[in-house]
Image (spheres, grey):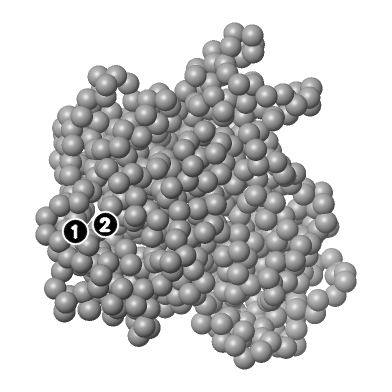
């Protein structure tokens, strides 16, 4: 494949670092029912599981729990591959993709083994490399029984890296080492370039630099003198430097201004306001990823600016704020309130503050996220030893169990799956540890149905406060009832994911099976604690939608006859419409000065009024053309009826009179909780 590809104007193609050399991922170009490659590399299609396949008992059991059209994808897996049980593990796993795992078959094995979100770091590789990986993941979502979201790690102007080394330098205490911005073709021994020219202007004599080292440690350099483009240092903590490793300054936020030479004014302003390269956001928008993770977020303003840009571009992308500086801790409440999720980046955070304070702040961030109803992700060094060795240390196992006890939504594997020697063992190890600790916590909880319910979220950004409080109380009741009745599952029907998020926040013991009409919402929900999302057709009659969902779960062996399930759904009832004053206020709140609102904004405006239309029409209003296309592909593969939840060009824009007419036909939201036996 070529090493570069044209995207949209303004997105340069980055030079691929040597770290990714020779690791161009392969891609499947067919979008029909998969014909998979087996050991002999012949291509076969296997319509059903039979004794003649020669599969192991584990594989045979897995084959029987997936629809016929997906069984061939499982047979592409190696015999020793893990296939996780549907909905068994509540704490999610985010796996970073790199040279060790970038090919389609490797990604499929990760998805089968429990990867819920694939993380791509734009600091490594070029846009073409990442595009191919995303297409492979999309192929897996479309043609296999597994669901995997995508998260792109966006760079920051505070993120400074070492250069690329032909051989990693090993530094001893007292050695001299120079950091430079000279950008030469080659450097003498003991010299490395840095990734940002503004670094030299920020560093001062006496600063303590912490450079990423091989094996998860740091090499500490004391700045002795700064002259022109060179920064002379003395090694005070020895180690082996890592190529393109990060550089942090103890106790200091770099706040490096972006290099705007040669850029137009608008681009320069965008870089400064967003705090990250706008071309990387543009790539994320074009590739329709589920999440972007912003590095070195220090205030809520950056999160708000990025979200505003995404919404202006019509992108339904969640914003993850990475907490990795002292300033971020000072502004923690506002950052959590503004973000869609928060990641505790313990590596860089441990360089910015005293390392002994990191466990305390990890707990504080997790608690703050629970209060705000936002997912908490914890990253860095969970299984660092497994980059080189096939088994974890006991300390690493303890570290993971502590994160489970803190009820984190997800744990992040970085180098373990990106460049490690044992990516699948690392994933399997984390999966096993998380499951075991989850089981133990459930044993400790016993029959206690009170749960650790956080208080209602303040300053809600969805619906009106009264309606929002009702939604939270209903979700809490569903979680408590599921524990009291020892329910096998909680079924949640959601258009945008809110009710699934509120239910997940309560941390019930039962798995939460969330059903939504659009693939993008389904993929985003895969980040939430305890939630296993499905795409499901929404009908005019809610009972038909519930029947569709129950059929999916029974076919997947997720529920069994005679088991009790909790169903959380909305129905139409109560009053019709709303007063003229309230309708006008809701329209103006969403329109923000415009004469029109989009079709998807109609639903938001109705929610402010506590109103809704039929699930089928709401799904139609919330779908973009690309959502319709992706949902249609899935329905074709699954042999479902032709797509009915489709967009309507006539519903493209609404002015106030049209919204008045629409609101007059809507009805008050009635939340229902149902206790059912699986038949």
Please, is residue 463 above or below residue 418 in the view? below
Please, is residue 623 above or below residue 404 in the view? below
Residue drawn at the location 25% of the way across and 19% of the way down: 562
Is residue 189 toward the left or the right of residue 350 in the image?
A: right
Q: Badge 1, how many Cα within 10 Å: few under 14, some, many 20+?
A: many
Quick one: label 2 or label 1, which is nearer the N terminus? 2
Q: Badge 2, how many Cα within 10 Å: few under 14, some, many 20+?
A: many
User: Which quarter of the figure is the C terminus placed in?
Assistant: top left
**Residue 583: image location, x then y, percent:** 21, 74
Secondary structure under the numbered disc 1 in the rendered image: strand
Secondary structure under the numbered disc 2 in the rendered image: loop
Is residue 96 toward the left or the right of residue 191 in the image?
A: left
Real-space CA distance between mark 2 and mark 1, rounded to the nearest whole angstrom:
6 Å
Residue drawn at the location 66% of the way across and 63% of the way down: 123
For residue 462, the mark is none
Q: Residue furthest bottom?
A: 265
Kindly indicate whether the residue at mark 1 contacts the one at mark 2 (C-beta within 8 angstroms).
Answer: yes
**Residue 668: image location, x then y, percent:** 17, 58
437 or 664: which is nearer to us? 664
* Mark 1, residue position: 667
* Mark 2, residue position: 613
Question: Is residue 647 visible in the rendered structure shown here?
Answer: yes
Residue drawn at the location 15% of the way across and 61% of the way down: 576
**Residue 88: image location, x then y, percent:** 39, 31
């Amino acid at each position: 494949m070529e090493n570069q590809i044209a995207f949209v104007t303004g997105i340069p193609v980055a030079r691929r670092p040597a770290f990714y050399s020779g690791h161009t991922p392969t891609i499947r170009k067919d979008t029909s029912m998969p014909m998979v490659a087996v050991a002999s590399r012949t291509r076969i299609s296997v319509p059903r599981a039979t004794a003649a396949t020669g599969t192991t008992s584990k594989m045979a059991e897995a084959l029987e729990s997936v629809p016929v059209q997906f069984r061939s994808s499982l047979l592409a897996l190696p015999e020793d591959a893990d296939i996780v049980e549907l909905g068994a593990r509540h704490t999610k796993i985010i796996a970073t993709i790199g040279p060790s795992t970038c090919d389609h078959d490797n990604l499929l094995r990760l998805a089968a083994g429990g990867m819920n979100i694939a993380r791509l770091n734009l600091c490594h590789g070029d846009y073409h490399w990442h595009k191919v990986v995303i297409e492979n993941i999309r192929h897996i979502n479309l043609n296999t029984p597994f669901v995997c979201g995508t998260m792109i790690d966006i760079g920051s102007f505070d993120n400074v890296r070492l250069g690329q080394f032909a051989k990693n330098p090993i530094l001893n205490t007292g050695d001299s080492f120079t950091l430079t911005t000279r950008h030469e073709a080659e450097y003498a021994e003991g010299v490395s370039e840095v990734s940002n020219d503004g670094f030299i202007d920020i560093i001062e004599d006496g600063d303590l630099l912490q450079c990423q080292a091989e094996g998860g440690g740091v090499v500490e350099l004391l700045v002795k003198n700064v002259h022109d483009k060179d920064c002379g240092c003395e090694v005070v903590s020895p180690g082996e430097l890592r190529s393109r490793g990060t550089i942090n300054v103890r106790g200091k936020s770099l706040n490096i201004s972006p290099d705007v030479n040669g850029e137009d004014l608008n681009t320069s302003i965008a870089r400064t306001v967003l705090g990250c390269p706008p071309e990387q956001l543009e790539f994320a928008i074009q590739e329709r990823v589920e999440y972007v993770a912003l590095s070195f977020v220090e205030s809520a303003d950056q999160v708000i600016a990025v979200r505003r840009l995404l919404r202006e571009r019509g992108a339904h992308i969640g914003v993850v704020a990475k907490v990795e500086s002292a300033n971020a801790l000072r502004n923690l409440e506002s950052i959590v309130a503004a973000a869609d999720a928060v990641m505790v980046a313990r590596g860089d955070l441990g360089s910015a503050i005293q390392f002994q304070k990191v466990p305390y702040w990890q707990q504080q961030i997790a608690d703050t996220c629970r209060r705000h109803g936002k997912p908490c992700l914890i990253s860095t060094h969970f299984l660092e030893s497994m980059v080189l060795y096939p088994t974890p240390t006991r300390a690493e196992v303890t570290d993971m169990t502590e994160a489970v006890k803190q009820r984190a939504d997800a744990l992040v594997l970085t180098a373990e799956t990106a460049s490690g020697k044992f990516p699948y063992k690392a994933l399997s190890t984390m999966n096993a540890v998380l499951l075991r600790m989850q089981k133990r916590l459930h044993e400790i909880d016993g029959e206690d149905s009170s749960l650790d319910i956080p208080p209602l979220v303040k300053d809600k950004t969805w619906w009106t406060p009264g309606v929002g409080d009702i939604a939270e109380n209903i979700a809490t009741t569903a979680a408590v009832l599921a524990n009291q009745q020892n329910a096998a599952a909680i079924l949640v029907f959601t258009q945008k994911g809110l009710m699934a998020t509120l239910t997940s926040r309560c941390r019930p013991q039962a798995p939460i099976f969330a059903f939504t009409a659009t693939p993008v919402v389904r993929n985003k929900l895969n980040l939430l604690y305890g939630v296993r999302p499905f795409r499901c057709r929404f009908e005019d009659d809610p009972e038909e939608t519930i029947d569709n969902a129950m059929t999916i779960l029974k076919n997947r062996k997720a529920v069994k006859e005679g088991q009790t399930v909790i169903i959380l759904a909305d129905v139409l009832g109560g009053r019709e419409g709303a007063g003229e004053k309230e309708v006008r206020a809701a329209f103006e709140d969403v329109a923000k000065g415009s004469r029109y609102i989009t079709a998807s904004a109609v639903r938001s405006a109705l929610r402010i009024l506590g109103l809704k239309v039929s699930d089928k029409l709401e799904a139609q209003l919330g779908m973009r053309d690309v959502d319709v296309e992706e949902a249609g592909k899935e329905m074709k593969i699954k042999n479902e009826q032709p797509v009915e939840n489709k967009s309507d060009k006539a519903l493209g824009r609404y002015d106030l009179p049209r919204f008045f007419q629409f609101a007059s036909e809507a009805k008050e939201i009635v939340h229902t909780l149902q206790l059912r036996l699986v038949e």
